Image (cartoon, helix red, strand yellow):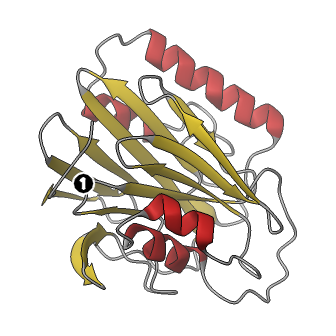
């Protein structure tokens, strides 16, 4: 939930996320399908709060969470609900965009949400106000959580991403996972972190959205060296 990329390549959309957490936090459960309300959802579950940072639904929507809005904030420790549960509310909606517009986020910790449902949207909540930014799905994008990475580090990571993109005109899904699984000679601020504070990259999760109506979620559990690949059928998908 701390690094997310969106790549349009070879007729596919690739959304990939690194989950960075303190070693005291329990590992996520492997991706599984669950029906929430009337909507089928696929996600790796965080056993601590019951939510997730990455989920997709049967209507072809994908939502990925990053901690923080625009800047590193001071947590109050008195929030009404986990951000991972908010994400599940969004992805279990038949119209996630409308729900984001309507839902009350008072006393929810700041977060950034990347939402794809045929269109690409960046949503930010800074603790006081909502910000919606439509993005071009034909272009490539990267996000780094402001709670873990300073502005100059975010810029450096963006340059690494741009170098990777420019050097690979026909990027494959496996190459993107490899890129996200590299510390780039920096365990403090690379894409794989292992900080003295106990913060580590737990996993890399990816969804592949093809030209048909199916998606595939790949989940690489870095701490246990396990890999899961889960095909997921959709009822509709607007490309």
At a point 63% along the width and 86% down the height, the residue shown is 81
Residue 69, placed above or below residue 91 = above
Any part of residue 74 in sight: yes
Residue under label 1, please give it: 217
Give coordinates of residue 206: x percent, y percent: 33, 48
**Foreground: 106 or 83?**
106
Give coordinates of residue 97: x percent, y percent: 50, 58
Q: Quadrant of the C terminus?
A: top left
**Label 1, residues with CA under 10 Å away: few <14, some 14-19, many ≥20:** many
**Foreground: 102 or 35?**
102
Give coordinates of residue 112: x percent, y percent: 64, 56
Whether residue 219 sits left or right of residue 233 in the image: it is right
Any part of residue 202 in sight: no
Residue 63, placed above or below residue 184 = below
How many numbered discs, if any?
A: 1
- The quarter holding residue 6 reads top left
Q: Secondary structure beneath disc 1?
A: strand
At a point 67% along the width and 42% down the height, the residue shown is 189
Residue 99, placed above or below residue 37 = above
Give coordinates of residue 228: x percent, y percent: 20, 59
At a point 46% along the width and 79% down the height, the residue shown is 51
Whether residue 17 sits left or right of residue 153 in the image: it is left
Q: Quadrant of the N terminus?
A: bottom right
**Foreground: 20 or 115?**
115
């Amino acid at each position: 939930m701390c690094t997310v990329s969106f790549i349009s390549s070879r007729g596919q959309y690739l959304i990939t996320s690194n989950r960075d957490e303190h070693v005291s936090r329990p590992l996520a459960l492997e991706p599984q399908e669950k029906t929430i309300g009337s909507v089928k959802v696929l996600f790796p579950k965080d056993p601590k709060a019951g939510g997730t940072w990455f989920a997709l639904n049967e209507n072809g929507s994908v939502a990925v969470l990053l901690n923080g809005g625009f800047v590193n904030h001071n947590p109050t420790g008195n929030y009404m609900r986990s951000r991972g549960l908010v994400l599940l509310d969004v992805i279990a909606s038949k119209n996630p965009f409308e729900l984001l517009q309507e839902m009350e986020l008072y006393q929810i910790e700041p977060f950034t949400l990347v939402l794809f449902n045929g269109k690409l949207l960046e949503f930010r909540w800074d603790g006081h106000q909502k910000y919606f930014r439509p993005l071009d799905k034909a272009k490539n994008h990267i996000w780094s959580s402001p709670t873990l990475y300073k502005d100059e580090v975010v810029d450096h990571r963006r340059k690494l991403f741009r170098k990777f993109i420019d050097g690979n005109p026909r990027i494959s899904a496996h190459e993107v996972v490899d890129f996200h699984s590299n510390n780039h000679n920096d365990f403090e601020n690379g894409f794989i972190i292992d900080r003295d504070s106990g913060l580590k990259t737990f996993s890399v999760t990816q969804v592949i959205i093809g030209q048909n109506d199916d998606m595939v979620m790949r989940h690489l559990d870095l701490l246990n060296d396990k890999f899961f690949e889960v095909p997921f059928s959709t009822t509709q998908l607007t490309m």
